[in-house]
Image: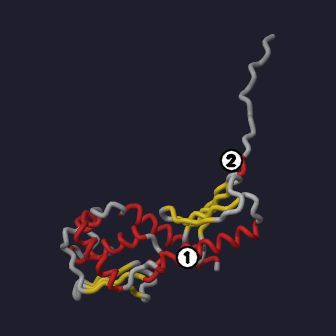
């Protein structure tokens, strides 16, 4: 009788050797936060933005309470920094002009572009009658490429008011359209879920 062939060896693999990563959604803002722990990182704590999420780097040994505190502090720091370098209305108009030139062949010529605190449900709006564009305050903390997408979207409405095929052809000249739409959808989902559980 032959010995049975040895089965596949199950080797237990130590999970990432002290390195872990977890992504959470901040219920207050819908912001995605990735917490990365590294055994090699002994003392330093840092944070930066990677696309649609804020990444916080922590030493592996940090306890849960300290982790919570540091993540909150670092996320607030990144968001503050982003808010501080947000353009005012004048800068927003200049930015819109630039985007119109680059992606819409300069055909969208808004009379005014401004931030609006009234837009809680929409990201932006466009009134073709007076050629005004308003951008929701909620985007002040969004990454630049998301803000640019919303600007291009509203500017394109000056050329094509409806969400027609022609409209989306215009908007898709902006290369980050799909990515930005996914980011905004994720934000809405996160913000809605947070509001429900609050
Ligand atoms: Zn639209």
Q: Is residue 146 left or right of residue 168?
A: right
Q: Residue at x 31, y 76 (%)?
A: 95
Q: Residue at x 39, y 73 (%)?
A: 147
Q: Residue at x 67, y 63 (%)?
A: 44
Q: Which residue is mark 1?
A: 29
SS at mark 1?
A: loop
Residue 128: image location, x then y, percent:
23, 83
Q: Where does the N terminus fall, quadrant-wise?
A: top right
The label shown at residue 16 is: 2
Please tell me which residue lies in front, 45 or 124. 45
* CA separation in Å, label 1 and label 2: 30 Å
Outermost residue on the front side: it is 43
Q: Quadrant of residue 89?
A: bottom left
Q: Is residue 45 left or right of residue 65?
A: left
Residue 54: image location, x then y, percent:
55, 66
> Height in image: 15 above or below 108?
above
């Amino acid at each position: 009788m032959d010995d049975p062939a040895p089965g596949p060896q199950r080797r237990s693999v130590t999970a990432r050797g002290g390195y872990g990563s977890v992504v959470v959604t901040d219920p207050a803002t819908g912001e995605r936060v990735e917490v990365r722990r590294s055994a090699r990182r002994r003392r330093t704590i840092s944070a930066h933005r990677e696309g649609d999420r804020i990444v916080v780097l922590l030493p592996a040994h940090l306890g849960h309470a300290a982790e919570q505190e540091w993540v909150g502090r670092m996320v607030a720091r990144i968001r503050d920094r982003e808010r501080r370098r947000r353009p005012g209305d004048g800068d927003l108009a200049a930015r819109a002009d630039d985007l119109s030139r680059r992606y819409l062949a300069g055909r969208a010529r808004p009379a005014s572009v401004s931030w609006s605190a009234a837009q809680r449900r929409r990201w932006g709006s466009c009134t073709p009658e007076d050629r005004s564009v308003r951008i929701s305050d909620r985007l002040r903390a969004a990454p630049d490429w998301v803000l640019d997408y919303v600007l291009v979207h509203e500017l394109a409405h000056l050329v094509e008011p409806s969400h027609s095929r022609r409209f989306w052809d215009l908007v898709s000249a902006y290369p980050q359209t799909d990515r930005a739409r996914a980011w905004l959808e994720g934000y809405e989902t996160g913000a809605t879920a947070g509001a429900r559980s609050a």
